[in-house]
Structure formats: structure tokens, C-alpha cells
Amino acid sequence: MEHNPHDETKLIAVIALLVSVLLVVSILFGITYLSDLRHIDKEVDAKSCYIKGG
């Protein structure tokens, strides 16, 4: 079996892609989670959601 350097390069590229996707998803999840924690104490005024009939 021949040693092909392109196989190792492809493997490293796939691993790097997966790690970068995991990092981006983790950062987006963290931003969303912290944003939810910051705004959890605000009450939602349900009456303001309805259309005011005139």
C-alpha cells in the first residue's frame, strides 16, 4: 500500500472543518444563552400583542 500525502492532508482538512464548525456552533449557542439569561427578568406584556380595534 502506497503512502499518499494527499490522504493525510484531506484528513487534516476534514478534522479542521469539523472543529471550526463545532467552535462556531458553540459560540452562537453561548451568545444566545447569555442573551436569554440577561433578558429573562423582563415581563412580557401580553396585552400589547393584540391589535387594538379602533
Image (cartoon, helix red, strand yellow):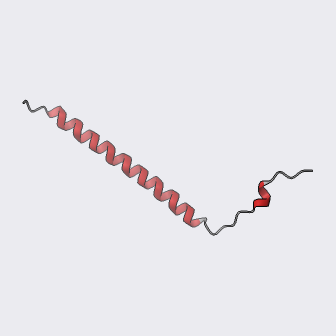
Image spot of residue 5 (x, y percent): 14, 34
Image spot of residue 17 (x, y percent): 32, 42
Q: Relative to residue 19, is residue 30 drawn left or right?
A: right
Q: Which residue is drawn at 61% across and 66% down?
A: 40
Q: Relative to residue 37, is residue 54 drawn left or right?
A: right
Looking at the image, residue 26 lies above or below residue 21: below
**Quadrant showing the N terminus:** top left
**Quick one: 36 or 1, which is closer to the camera?**
1
Q: Residue at x 9, y 33 (%)?
A: 3
Q: How many labels does the image show?
A: 0
Image spot of residue 48 (x, y percent): 79, 58
Q: Which residue is drawn at 79% across and 60% down?
A: 47
Residue 35 position by quadrant: bottom right
**Quick one: 41 or 9, which is closer to the camera?**
41
Looking at the image, residue 36 lies above or below residue 54: below
**Quick one: 9 or 47, which is closer to the camera?**
47
Q: Which residue is drawn at 27% across and 44% down?
A: 15
Q: Relative to residue 2, is residue 44 drawn left or right?
A: right
Q: Relative to residue 42, is residue 52 drawn left or right?
A: right
Q: Residue lying farthest left?
A: 1
Q: Residue lying farthest right?
A: 54
Residue 12 position by quadrant: top left
